[in-house]
Amino acid sequence: MSAGESSGDHHGAAVAREIRRKLPRARLFGIGGREMEAAGVSRIAGLDELSVMGGTEVLRRLPGFLRLERRIRRLFLTEDVRLFLPIDYPGLNLRLARSARRQGRRVLYYIAPQVWAWRERRAAKLRRDCDRVLTVLPFEAALLERHGVRTDFVGHPLLDATRAPDGGAGGGPPAGSPAETAAMWGRTSCGGRVIGLFPGSRAQEVRCMLPVFAEAARQLAGRHPALDFVIARPPHLPESLYAGAGFPTAGAREATERSWAALTKSGTITLELALAGVPMVVGYRMGRVEWAIGRRLVRVPSIVLVNLVAEAPVVPEFLQDRLTAERAAQALEALLGEEAPARREMLRGFDTVRERLGKPGCAARVARHAIELLGALDSEGRPGGPC
């Protein structure tokens, strides 16, 4: 298994638990974080070795990436790997999939590269090197099938991450509509409301986004003194990275649960917030070279997954030079009132997103695909064949 970011580590851990539940003797190892390790995946590399953002950072750390890639290739041989299960992170995982394919290993790609956004030529690599590609967004499967990729839409893993407001089992937002979710967490009270800041899971992202996010928070606090603020910090990033912001940090789950509204980077976190019923504003910046290249390659009307799934501009987004503290604070201010039109309209848009993301049970469906490719299902489709 190979996950290069904290979200992939989380989703990979859920799949690992399902595989081990159905095949207790299966041996799992690969690249991941603490969650995958806790789920029984023996780590050969951690997320800190892969956490980069933008082309210049990738070039600086390329020698380390190449060494890691060579290690994985050797392990395909020495450990007699039966199945390679890459999770997102295409920069590395597509190359590893090629290596696995050349060595005759089965490849099950989970969370397909976003060929619908840019670099559509990657679809040809998926067709060549993967036995199956599992998609988590509703519009991806049809596009990949047009390129001849063997694919299946398994629903979104975030729908598996449910827990009760009293802290019951699970790992994310509770089930139900986003409006119901907000009420379940007690966010509709008139007491001190919390604004969550989600600057990213990579150190370079945080360095780029946090200063403007924190300044927007200070401006908002100046106009609304009763507001509290919290910064989401992933466990693999040091507290010192956030020292100058002036606000406390918490894990992403806790920050999501506490937030009345959020200022966030783009990415999967926007879907997490939408499913948790947290209205948001999205901002994103990157290096000028990367931005100049990216704006010529990206072919979608929005970088916000919520907007793409809803096929509507549900969430406001401010990119690159348009991301200023003043604009972000003003957009957040429109979401503060419980009956604010912008807030109510956004929550209705979140309902559409939830409906389109499929049904819970994603990790179990991924595990079933993995077991099928291992040839470990009996004639009636139950675990029990060779492994």
Image: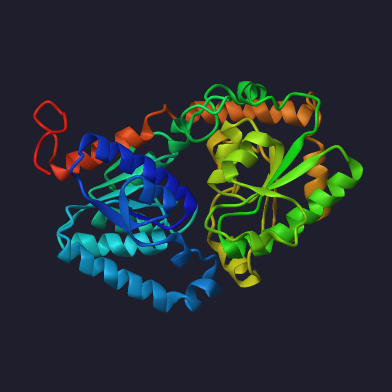
Res 23 → quadrant = top left
Q: What residue appears at the point 31 percent right and 47 percent down from the top-left corner?
A: 40
At which x and y percent is residue 113? 41, 52
Res 239 → quadrant = bottom right
Q: How is the image coloured?
A: rainbow
In the figure, is residue 56 to the left or right of 91? Answer: right
- Considering depth in this image, is 382 or 137 the residue closer to the camera? 382
Q: Is residue 320 above or below residue 380?
A: below
- Considering depth in this image, is 359 or 7 the residue closer to the camera? 7
Q: Is residue 38 above or below residue 365?
A: below
Res 350 → quadrant = top right
Q: Quadrant of the C terminus?
A: top left
Q: What residue appears at the point 53 percent right and 45 percent down from the top-left corner?
A: 268
In the figure, is residue 117 to the left or right of 85? Answer: right
Q: What residue appears at the point 48 percent right and 48 percent down from the top-left corner?
A: 7
- Visible in this render: residue 317? yes
At which x and y percent is residue 123? 35, 54
Q: What residue appears at the point 80 percent right and 51 percent down from the top-left corner?
A: 216
- Considering depth in this image, is 15 or 151 the residue closer to the camera? 15
